[in-house]
Image: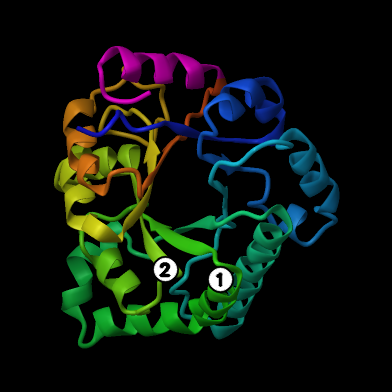
Amino acid sequence: MTSLPLLGAAMPLDTLDTLRDWVLADQRDLELQDFTTAEVLSGDWQPLVARARALLDGYEGRLGIHGPFWGLSLANLDFEIRAIVTKRLLQGLEVCEALGATQMVIHSPYTTWDYNNLDNYADARDRVVALVHETLAPAVTRAEDLGVTLVIENIEDKDTDARCLLADSFSSDAVAVSVDTGHAHYAHGTHGAAPVDYYIRRAGERLRHVHLQDADGYADRHWGIGLGTINWASVFDAVAPLDGRARLILELRDKAQILPSAQRLAAMGLAR
């Protein structure tokens, strides 16, 4: 019998400053959140990298970053905007190289509108995939060179499978899938999508990253674990076959909830 899965967390450097001992004690997976905006990526981010490296002295865990996403659809119809999206993704990968990070979270292009309308237009599904390939291809090549995996996170996705098939279409180890539990629970509660554990099971072996956050099924709450209505036993049962290959990242709005959330999951006998 395998041991309980080890929790990691997403946080900015200011929070890492206070939770460093918790992260390093068990070499937990870590996702840094300081490199998502244009202001940072087009500015001088080297001091942030230097600070991160100092805080992570002695760290041997799996490091990732949340990549840029604000206003950056991978399937934008405007070729000039797609060029900006590609630029931001490549900037994020520069940060990964400087940090030694091996994973970068990016956002799915699929919307709730897409779920009801992609089959309403001829070749619309193929068009989305083609646009994403145009946007993402340079970043995939760069990620392959760096040994970084781009994980595509569900955002508005009502369809459990579309972004999984999108990831498959690259035929690259540098493209995999992420599931955000709160986003899936929102889609389930508000739009009638499948429950959270179905998203995880449908991702299968493509799944390399999970954002753990609790929610009420109405909005993207990012609450601490146990403060919403997600069935956590089903989530961890669905994750179990991956045996640690997917990073389990607490992504909470209130960073003071990281340790209590980890303690709640430990008390439930689901994680450590």
Q: Quadrant of the N terminus?
A: top left
Amino acid carrying label 1: it is Ala
Provide the residue span drawn in magenta: 256-272
Q: Is residue 269 magenta?
A: yes
On screen, residue 38 above or below 135: above
Q: Mark 1 and mark 2 in contact (Cβ < 8 Å)? A: yes
Disc 2 marks which residue? Answer: 175
Q: In the shown orientation, is residue 154 left or right of residue 32? A: left
Q: Residue at x 74, y 34 (%)?
A: 55
Is-magenta flag for residue 146? no
Q: Amino acid at mark 2?
A: Val
Mark drawn on residue 143: 1
Q: Name the one closer to the observer, 55 or 138.
A: 55
Q: Is residue 120 visible?
A: yes
Residue at 60% from the left image edge and 29% from the top image edge: 24
Looking at the picture, how far across and down is residue 76, in whole percent?
47, 74
x, y percentage for residue 45? 80, 53
**Residue 120 lies in what quarter of the image?**
bottom left
Q: Could you classify mark 1 by the number of other residues whose Cα lies within 10 Å: few (under 14), some (14-19), or many (20 or more)?
A: many
